[in-house]
Amino acid sequence: MFDLTGKSALVTGASGGIGADIARVLHKAGATVALSGTRTAPLEELAAELGDRAHVLACNLSDAEAVEALPKQAAAAMGAVDILVNNAGITRDSLFMRMSDDDWASVLDVNLTSSFRLCRGVLRGMMKARWGRIINITSIVGHTGNPGQGNYAAAKAGLVGMSKSLATEVASRGITVNCVAPGFIATAMTDKLNDEQKAKIQVQIPAGRMGSPAEIAAAVLYLASPEAGYVTGATLHVNGGMTMI
Amino acid sequence: MSDIADRVKKIVVEHLGVEEDKVTENASFIDDLGADSLDTVELVMAFEEEFGIEIPDDAAETIQTFGDAVKFITEAS
């Protein structure tokens, strides 16, 4: 089950905790992977760990031209892009009254606009192949909101609307577009929280713990698989029951 | 029939899965050949690739029939 042999996947933000695990699990299922991110060193390390069928494609997602070029580079490296995982994301947290235009624009640019451009860039190949999987990594805060994250929540909610619209357009061509919405996941980002903050969060999670990047990756693997061909426009929430929607 | 018309017809036949004799001068992609809006976008992209031309959105909208396509591509290439 969930065999991706012969498929090629482009994963953005592959230098981060969740992105790296997504790349690992897709690779393990047989896919060729293109690892994209801004920091080359961790990407090279991951590629070395994976061995064959792994390509490193550095890309700064706030650079529109670089984003336009990325799907072409990925197709050149792997022969095609059958699976796109828009995982990269940044935060510029600030309370609304203090949020600058720049904080707003940079988060929307990287988290939403670059995903739009990458989706558009891979569609032609997927349409021809009559097969494609696009998985956008959103967040629980795109559904619940979060103080200090007006920009981030807007971008993540925007991804959901974008995914549903695109899903409708391309469903007849064997292309599915879905979202995975992580709750609190143990990564470098959440490591910064102190024990008291962590304890407060865990009280709100029925599962009583944070999730792991591997648990997000497993959801992505399912949505990328041939078996998920009838699932499109959906958001799979992986949050330990923190918000049941 | 011109070489361009032959190549356009081949793309239309392959893409829409229709009989060659249905692809006549006035055959509308949507009304006569069963294309949906996404098919028309794909056809335009296929024409661009085949003939190495750019078909802007406003021009693409005017390409409704097989004859329209041949005319536009003949003038553009």
Image: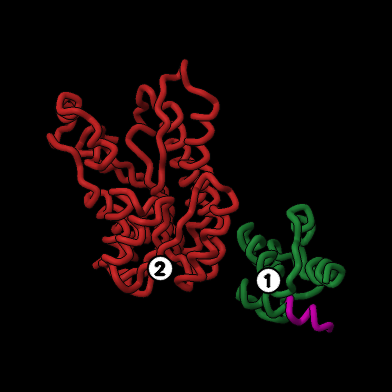
Q: Is B6 contained in the magenta span?
A: yes
Which chain's residue wears label 2? A
Chain A image colour: red
Badge 1 density bin: few <14, some 14–19, many ≥20, Cα 10 Å: few
Say if labels 2 and 1 share a chain: no
**Residue at x-position 54% and y-position 53%:** A67
Q: Which residue is mark 1?
A: B49
Assess disc 2: are there few (<14), some (14-19) or many (≥20) residues with their C-alpha within 10 Å of its C-alpha.
many
Please give the count of numbered marks on the rendered protein.
2
Q: Which residues are magenta?
A: B1-8
What kind of residue is marked 1?
A: Glu
Q: Which residue is mark 2?
A: A8
| Rendered position, A205 above or below A220 | above
Question: Circles 2 and 1: CB distance less than 8 Å?
Answer: no
Counting from the top left corner in percent of width and height, residue A6 is at 37, 74
**x then y, percent, for residue A61:** 50, 48
In the rendered structure, the colour chosen for chain B is green
- Residue nearest the observer in this picture, A70 or B24: A70
Residue drawn at point x = 45 percent, y = 61 percent: A57
Q: Is residue A147 left or right of residue B54?
A: left
Q: Amino acid at mark 2?
A: Ser
Task: Report the front residue among B26 and B68.
Answer: B68
Residue sitting nearer the eye, B16 or A232 = A232
* Residue situated furthest front in the rendering: A41
Quick one: quadrant of the C terminus of chain A? top left
Q: Circle 1 — which element?
A: helix
> Would you say residue A227 is visible in this rendering?
no
- Image coords of residue A121 (percent x, y): 55, 58
Q: Is residue A211 left or right of residue A79?
A: left
